Image (tube, rainbow, N blue to C red):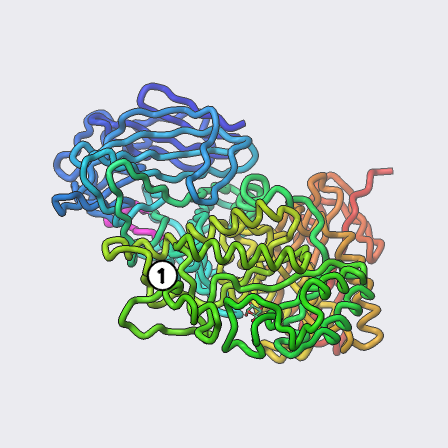
Amino acid sequence: MAEILNEGNIWHLRNEWISYALMELPGGVLAHLYAGPRLQRLNPVGLMRRHGVDAEAFTVQECALDRLPQEYPSFGLGDMREGALTVEAPDGSCAVDLRLVCAEILDAKPALEGLPATRGEGCAAARFHLRDAHTGLEVELNYAVYDDCAALVRSARLVNRGEAPLVVERAYSLCLDLPDADWDLITLSGSWARERAVHRRPLVAGFQGVSTQRGASSLQTSPFMALARHEATEASGDVLGMALIYSGNFIARAEAVCTGGTRLLMGLNDRDFAWRLEPGEAFTTPEAALVVSTAGVGGMSRAFHTLWENHLLPKRWMGAERPVLLNSWEAAYFDFDEDKLLAIAEATADAGAKLFVMDDGWFGHRDDDTTSLGDWQTDLRKLPSGLKALGERVRALGIGFGIWMEPEMVSPDSDLYRAHPDWCLHIPGREGITARHQLVLDLGREDVQEFVYTAVADTLKESGAAYLKWDMNRNFSNIGSAALPANRQKETAHRYILGLYAVLGRLTADFPDVLFEGCSSGGGRFDAGMFYYVPQFWCSDDTDALMRCEIQYGTTLVFPPSTMGCHVSAVPNHQTSRVIPMATRFAVALGGSFGYELDPRRLTDEEREAMRGQIVFANATQQLRLYGAFYRLRSPFEGNDTAWMSVSPERDEALFTYVRNRAVPNVLPPLVKLRGLDALRRYRVVETGEVYGGDELMTVGLSCPVPSLGSGDAWSVMYTLKGEDEA
Ligand code: GLA
């Protein structure tokens, strides 16, 4: 159970796995005492001495803040490191001196105004009130620690209690001061079709980290970073993971400082950001999550997975069936009409899938990507019977109908743009820069939010869709809003994300049974902010199974399999031209929310038969694959193979997948040590009938059959393990 202990000037937030402690120093300075594995008792003097601070004799003079571990450090009063908070006062100065006013242990975790955040059940929550006497700025630091995972969440709320406007120039969500720098930094970076590759390197003196100023959490990186002890592996050792529940510009940085310590900061990126706070107004930062693992990078991931699954992802979809779907994009691109779609839908139903998704190209006069975003009227040239009739005809086949939209965008060639040129992000007098021939709607505006809500709601109602793919295919440029005065222009990008959340919040509340899948040129906004609204996200436009091994491996560092949209596509693959056996394409797509991205009519009879069997298997293993405990076993970033497994909560069932990239002749069979099983139990490998002890599978390993000569590249094997009681 999570609990918050308060003794004098010490607050200790903890649960079964983690402890997090704060301390008030003389003068009301709020120091950070400890974050890590659970401690039974704390010695504040010793914990502070790690940083070279004498807790009892502390004063802020002589730049003593420069080595003090602080909960929410600011700029300009003696701490020379980067801080978490910068606020400009009416006199033009930027120093803030926060002192603790009081602390409260809360009965319930409050929701965050306008922002996604972990929900309030099953946690202990506390709030610390700090104040800067010079400006009247108040800062509330909010914390919660959960009962069921090694995770703590925190956020800050700034209130202007002064008499003059203040300008918030930086307000991060998390600061963590550690007494050493003997860590590796792990981040995720990539690009289109290569999202979330794992990067691990030792911390070096100075700054390092990741950030984005693209307007979205981005294809290029993720709002996540972790510190792992140099010796920590996938399965053992100390790791601290941090993730931001936010979908826009963020920054995550580590500063290894000259005294030997490390400061970690995470929050809204302050590039092109400033927020004006009139007297009485408040500003809330996104929430950041901190997880602590003593079981390596894998332990960190499972703590994140539990946190998101139990406290963030939409409850309606947790543990619920995800329909096996077929998406029309790679089957038809823009080239379709009603007959073609219905023929594909019929073949989809015939194979046993549950949902047919019509992707881009159904509205305006969109024969390619140069036009019509914003004109969400059905293109009657392609679909003469209309959207309603199409939805009905698909449902008449016994399957659900799903639809694609890109609601946040407008094509310059559209009626919407011609009617409202000022509805897009733009800077008056400057040429608008298009990307994929489109401009970005200014979602910070209420009239634009209303338009987007209505366009999506009307489409869902007319089509009767059970599923919506919400796409977003370009990053921001020309960042400016016609709805804001000059001194609020730097609020544009954050207001956009708040507007996006407002619209998604309304739509998901009004259409609770519609399955929303996020997409952003693949996985370009794959973040915990989006996962408050959508239970799954298209993981990548790259459907090549070998590339997917890497992309899905990196993604699971932070997010559980249920969040990843993963489809079997045609060969040669449309992104890489590689030809990969169908069995391997299937095994890899089973790593997430499963579907197809191909024209089933072009499959051979044999492949169509295989597809039927695949769908039966996907359904039968869905609970285990999507919601079981997830273990990465082999990293594609370290060798010629990838392996992973999912284990049921009772540890009586597991699904193991192994993929070898390149065929290598004349080598011993792959031997993979399994994890997460019951050491004392016997397991039968269903596919071979072989029986092993759990301890043998975890200490010796499971040897996979040697691929016969000529089995080729991208060979895979999948095993179902069933626990057996001793006779
Ligand atoms: C993006 C998506 C694709 C597809 C196209 C349609 O690239 O990631 O899956 O929906 O848009 O234009």
State whether residue 713 is above or below residue 196: below
For residue 467: magenta?
Answer: no
Residue 352 sits in which quadrant?
A: bottom right
Residue 430 in percent (x, y) is at 28, 72
* Observer-nearest of 426 and 225: 426
- Which residue is depicted at the point 47% across and 42% down? 117
Task: Say which amino acid is labelled 1.
Answer: Gln
The residue at the point 38 percent across, 56 percent down is 249
> Residue 242, how many percent across, how many down?
44, 47
Q: Nearer the viewer, residue 3 or 282?
A: 282
Instruction: Please state if 376 lies on the left or on the right of 25 as rendered.
Output: right
Instruction: From the viewer's side, name the closer residue of 421 and 66.
Output: 421
Is 245 left, or right, of 363 in this rendering? Answer: left
Residue at the limit of the structure toward the right, as seen here: 727
For the N terminus, give its image quadrant. top right
Number of other residues with Cα within 10 Å of mark 1, as a class: few under 14, some 14 to 19, many 20 or more: many
* Relative horizontal placement of residue 516, taking residue 37 as reference (left or right): right
Q: Residue at x 36, y 65 (%)?
A: 422
Which percent across, then down, holds residue 203? Answer: 35, 55
The question of residue 254 being in magenta is answered with yes
Query: In the rendered view, would you say 113 is above or below 606?
Result: above
Q: Secondary structure at mark 1?
A: loop
Q: Is residue 623 above or below residue 47?
A: below
Residue segment shown in magenta: 252-263
Query: Residue placed farthest to the front in the image?
Result: 419
Q: Quadrant of residue 644?
A: bottom right
Which image quadrant shows ligand 1? bottom right
Position of 126 with respect to 347 (left or right) is left
Residue 157 visible in the shown view: yes
Q: Which residue is mark 1?
A: 213
Viewer can see residue 638: no
